[in-house]
Amino acid sequence: MSTLILKRLGKIWLALILFFLYAPILVMAFMSFNDSQYYQLPFEFSLRWYQDLAGNSEIIAAATRSVLIALITTIIATTLGTAASVALFRFEFKGKRILQVLLFPPIAIPWLITGTAMLIFFFGIGLGRGTPSVIIGHVALALPYVIVVVTARLATFDATLEEAARSLGANSWTVTRRVTLPWITPGIIAGALFAFAVSFDQFVVSYFLSEPGDSTLPVLIYTAIRKGFTPEINAISTIIITISMAVMLIAARFSNFGGER
Amino acid sequence: MAEVAVENVTKRFGTLKALDNVTIDFPDGGFFGLLGPSGSGKTTLLRTIAGFIFTDDGTIRIGSKSVEQIPVEKREIGMMFQNYALFPNMSVADNVGFGLRVRKVSLAEERRRVGEALELVQLGQHSNRKPHQLSGGQRQRVALARAIVTNPRVLLLDEPLSALDKSLRVDMQIELKRIQREIGITTIFVTHDQEEALTLSDKIGILRAGRMVQAGPPREVYNNPTDVFTASFLGEANILEGAVDGNSLRLTDGDAIPIPKGLKTGATFAVRPENISITTEEPTERDTPKIQARLKQRVFAGAMATCILDRNGSTFKVISRDRDLPQLPEGGPVWLSWEPEHTITIPN
């Protein structure tokens, strides 16, 4: 009897969690299709905010910039992260443990602090604000995610396969390309999608590092909200959420969160 | 094919000497077993010959060429791993052909040689399967075909049969030996299974704590072990110690057994369990070494039986055909005797 009540309570609890997580998002998505500028009901379906969006060159430019930065970040972070993971897997060297431990705090350090530190650093070295700084910052943020995901996949890789390939005459590049990479490809794809999501959704670091008039989409949205909220923001947010969730779902599919497929 | 020579090879891992001045040669075309307890350095030696481990000291030659500075991929070896290490994403044919593709052999030739190798291991019909669709024995054959298809100068096998169950293992021993004879490749394998080493090898090397304790043909090493470790590691041995007194050995408890003439100083002696006879009556022949003991346990194991005996606190073991053993009183006194030539002298 009591287990039945517990089960019911559990289900209600889960429903509440999902409700608080997704209700605001759903309301926002819902309102992006509402004709009224002031959130008035009854609901009147309209695509006018999406049409406005299409005509808003500022938002389109920011969105394009965001996608480009995310793509560049993904390519760099995935390449570096995969190479680092393979190196950490293959070699024993002094300070390896420390290096591995040092890779994780950036995930936990608040982005506000990372952003401030990066801003100071980039001014210190004379790079200042701008798209290159944003990309470097995003790569630094995305790298640990890639390494974590690819390393998790590598943990299921049998190192004697590399030895077998070498004994058959393959040099280390061939071993990597023919034996190691095929095995960790799902991990690399998942890592790349994480990197893309981290960059594309990034606000704080982008806000600190981008130049005014050269901002990414999240930064532009923030600035727009400060000037006055329009349902256009609902529309663009809905698009971003749809893309981000799709990316994360694909990532989850590929990484299986570290498990064996 | 080539001869392999290991000369004065030393390898340290930190303060541990994994290989300590090891010397052994493996003549061209032979089948050689490296045997020893775990941690003895046998796998380290195999991996050093393969090139996964570089020596700190000493020479390794394959053919006439010194290879200490040559990495694995340039040593022209074939290696079979304990877990077979087949590439899971490749078919049987692609696994076997891997070494040929790396060497940029033409597709037609690759097909032909892969076919021949699979034919040799009797797996011709499975070339399109993936490793996970094969049985343990089949995987092993694929691993073997992959290791020999490139015509390596030496074939290295790391615990080749340990992952198979017992009946399959015996079949594969015969199979392995047949294939090795057919292509005549110098083959070195590591095992902790002494029977396997004795069955397969033309020559065995016994390692202990990084040292090569004894090397030679299996029969020779078995019959003439040079120390107590080898005597009791390779097969089983009952050890006798005492002082030499004329032509006999005076055991610590006062009994004397005849020993080979000409031995002057102290020595240790060993007798194999299968060479001892048990009788209830004292044997009458004068030259027969004999001692008394108490039967503690008689273990029946089908055709053979093992008797555990106690002699003043030291344990003796006797193995014989069950039907050759008389009715023996458990706990009662019996005589152990053996032919004089079965007393193994172990030089101190």
Image: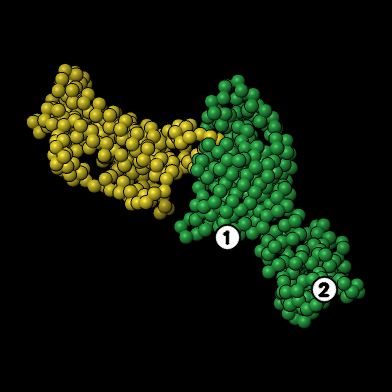
Chain colours: A yellow, B green
Give the residue drawn at x 52%, y 45%.
B68
Q: Which of the chains bears the disc numbered 2?
A: B
Give the residue drawn at x 19%, y 19%.
A54
* Depth order, front residue of B214/A15: B214
Mark 2 residue type: Pro
Residue farthest right in this picture: B284
Q: Are marks 2 and 1 on the same chain?
A: yes
Depicted A7 relative to depicted A215: above or below: below
Mark 1 residue type: Ala
Q: Pointers 2 and 1 in contact (CB under 8 A)?
A: no
Depicted B241 relative to depicted A176: above or below: below
The residue that mark 2 highlights is B258
Give the residue drawn at x 63%, y 49%.
B190
Give the residue drawn at x 14%, y 23%.
A58
Give how far across and how far down residue B189 sits, in percent.
64, 47
Horizontally, is B288 left or right of B186 in the view?
right
The residue that mark 1 highlights is B209
Residue B161 seen by the camera = no
Residue B326 seen by the camera = yes
Few, some or many residues within 10 Å of mark 1 (<14, 14–19, 20+):
some
Q: Which of the chains bears the disc numbered 1?
A: B
Give how far across and how far down residue A93 sits, in percent.
39, 49
Kind of element beneath mark 1: loop
Can you tell which quarter of the image residue A114 is in?
Answer: top left
Can you tell which quarter of the image residue B100 is in?
Answer: top right
Depicted B323 relative to depicted A191: above or below: below
Horizontally, is A101 left or right of A133 in the view?
right
Few, some or many residues within 10 Å of mark 2 (<14, 14–19, 20+):
some
Give how far across and how far down residue A90 sits, in percent.
43, 43
Mark 2 vs mark 1, CA separation in Å? 34 Å
Kind of element beneath mark 2: strand
* Depth order, front residue of B152/A243: B152
